[in-house]
Image (tube, grey):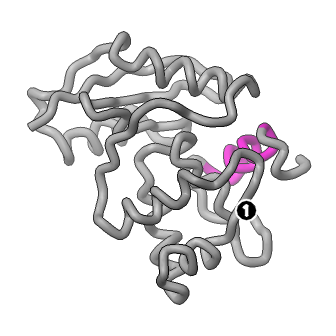
Amino acid sequence: MAKVYCTSFESKIGIIYVASTDRGVCKISIPKESKKDFFRWLHKHFDEDDVAENRSRNKQVIDEINRYLNRQLTKFNSDIHQIGTPFQRKVWRYVRRINYGTTLTYKEIAIKVKNPKAYQAVARANAANPIPIIIPCHRVIGANGTLVGYSAGIKTKEFLLGLEGAIII
């Protein structure tokens, strides 16, 4: 089993927890997801003995998230290690390509992943996204343009979209 390196840091939206393997970032918990939830996810996917506190291994992603939150970064360069089902990973790969400051609907993504009636499955995959911000599930909105379904809460989704200039708050 792979080693996973985790840490937390204070950001302008609150405490963020990050974890990475040698392949890349595998988990980001933004405020509203607790430290307990973060470690529950890690222990579901990794042996407890393989989880280690290590801030230096996460230096790049911490820097990128802080720069993003300060409007100094529009595209992440950190490698990622996607942990999910094949369908989830397919959705997340597509969501990761949504440009900064733009949005798509769940239905548009379902069409793009060649399953036009699967917009609810796309919504569930987004809800299970373990790498928010880098895989920008906040850029996915309801068919009528409403801000729906964000694990960190609608206010955080609204803040991130506003930060990117995608919506006027």
Residue at image position (47%, 41%) is 33
Asked if 108 appears above or below 43 in the picture, the reply is: below
**Is residue 76 rendered magenta in the image?**
no
Image spot of residue 110 (x, y percent): 54, 77
Query: Which quadrant of the structure image shows residue 98?
Result: bottom right
Image spot of residue 77 (x, y percent): 51, 31
Image spot of residue 165 (x, y percent): 84, 44
Query: Which quadrant of the structure image shows residue 2?
Result: top left
Q: Amino acid at mark 1?
A: Leu
Residue at image position (52%, 89%) is 117
Q: Nearer the viewer, residue 128 or 3?
A: 3
To which residue does mark 1 refer? 147
How many marks overall? Answer: 1
Main secondary-structure element of the magenta-colored stretch: helix
Relative placement, left or right, of 166 versus 25 is right
Image spot of residue 41 (x, y percent): 29, 44
In the picture, the quarter occupied by the N terminus is: top left
Magenta residues span: 153-163
